Image (cartoon, rainbow, N blue to C red):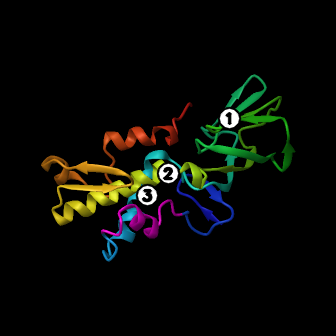
Amino acid sequence: MIKTPWGYTLTELNELPTILTAEEFNDMTAGRFTDDVRIDPMLTAAQSAVREFCGWHVADNQPCELTLLGRDRAVSHNHGDVLIQLPATFVTEVSSVEIDGGSLTDYDVTTDGLLWLYDTCFGRRAKIVINYSAGLTDGLAGGLKELIANRVTHALAQSYGIQSEAAGGESVTYSSTYMNSANATSLPETAKEVLNPYHIRRLF
């Protein structure tokens, strides 16, 4: 298992999952940059930038465990019910909720990570352990893979002095201003618009 930078644990992995592999990137760019040794570190950097913006691992779908205390800011008490914001915007299942070691079964969860615990009350020091699955399945991650491929392609094109390039089915011509600022970790507004559905918006 691995503790993620966003406070939860991926229970079945020892490292963060790869969203876009070098092999997939080479397929998407028709092998244009196959021998470039910078592809792997650029892919890692681009994926890290996406995850930092979104606030969770995003893909792929993985079993997760989150431990909170009753006083944490992700926990909101409301007249006998409790609302918890999970660090994810694509939750496919909550398999268990425990409060101080006791199992809770009366709850609902939304796909965008809001977990309602009904008819329950606990103190600020209570330990809450939630096991859930979250993340885009491979079949839904195509747009995310294209975005990462485009970020890496832009960075490589800049270093080669290329003025236009294609990746992930999209052809792009770069202006001199864009070429001077493009790199694998930069996320222009168009990229952020693509990522908005996966970006965690704190409600409280």
Q: Earlier in the sequence, mark 3 or mark 1?
A: 3
**Magenta stretch: residue 179 in it?**
no
Q: Residue at left 54%, top 54%?
A: 57
Query: Residue 151 at what x, y percent from top left?
Result: 33, 55
Spatial separation of the CA atoms under disc 3 and disc 1: 26 Å
Q: Residues within 10 Å of mark 2 (few under 14, many from 20)?
A: some
Three-letter residue code for mark 1: Thr
| Residue 51 seen in the current view | no
Which quadrant, please, contains the C terminus? top right
Q: Residue at left 79%, top 35%?
A: 107
Q: Which residues are magenta?
A: 18-32
Q: Is residue 176 toward the left or the right of residue 117 in the image?
A: left
Three-letter residue code for mark 2: Gly
Which residue is disc 1 drawn over?
A: 110
Q: Earlier in the sequence, mark 2 or mark 1?
A: 1
Q: Which mark is residue 142?
A: 2
The answer to the question of whether label 3 and label 2 lie on touching residues, with beta carbons closer than 8 A, is no
Spatial separation of the CA atoms under disc 3 and disc 2: 17 Å
Which quadrant, please, contains the N terminus? bottom right
